[in-house]
Amino acid sequence: MASKAVNRLSVRLSNLPAVRGSAPWPDHEYVKGWGVFGLPFDAGHVLALRVFPENDFGPYRTVWHRDPGGRWSIYVDGPRLDTACPRYYGPACDFTGYAQIGLTWDGPATCTSLWTRPHWTGLSPPPRPVPWSFSTR
C-alpha cells in the first residue's frame, strides 16, 4: 500500500493550493506542507527542501544547504524571511536570504528543484538542478 502512495506523490503534492489558514489552537502557528529533510552528498554537502503552501502567514519554500565545512545557508522563496525558516534557524546560519525556488515533477516520485539567488557572490558555485527522489525505503 505504501508504494502506491509514493507513486502518487507528484499528483498529491504538485498542485497544493497556496492558502492562508489558521492555527487550530490560540496563540500557535500553523503550517501544512511537505519536504525532504536531508539529502547528503559524497562531497560533504547536505541539502533540504521545505514546501509550505498553507500556513497562517504566507506560503513559502526553502532550500537549506550545509557546505562541507559545516556552514548552513537557508534560501527562501516567500514574502518575508521572518515568517519562514530563518525566523527560528537563521541565527545558526552563515547566510539567509531570498531565492527563486522552482519545482518540476519529473515522474510520480521524482522532483527536481532549481533555485537562483540574486547577486550570487561567487563563494560557492551557482546552483544546478537537484533531483529529489522519494521512496518508502
Image (spheres, helix red, strand yellow):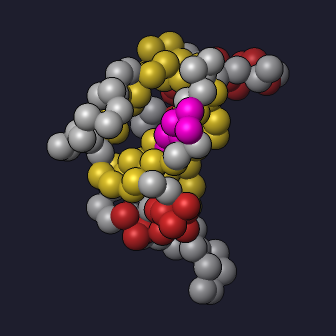
Task: Pick whichever, 112 or 118, lies toward us.
Answer: 118
Task: Pick whichever, 110 or 71, lies toward us.
Answer: 71
Q: Quadrant of the N terminus?
A: top right
83 with respect to 32 (left or right): left
Q: Where is residue 69 in the image (x, y as percent from the top left)?
A: 56, 38
Q: Residue at x 64, y 75 (%)?
A: 24
On the question of residue 8 being in view, the answer is: no
Q: Which residue is drawn at 32% across and 37% down?
A: 123
Tag count: 0
Q: Which residue lies furthest to the bottom in this view?
A: 26
- Tell whether position 68 is magenta: yes
- Residue 106's quadrant in the figure? top left
Q: Position of residue 76 (x, y in %)?
A: 37, 51
Q: Which residue lies furthest to the left in this view?
A: 119
Q: Which residue is drawn at 64% across and 36% down?
A: 38
Q: In which quarter of the image is the C terminus?
A: top right
Q: Which residue is drawn at 52% across and 36% down?
A: 67
Q: What stretch is highlighted in magenta?
A: 64-69
Vertical placement of 25 versus 105: above or below? Answer: below
Vertical placement of 62 versus 36: above or below? Answer: below
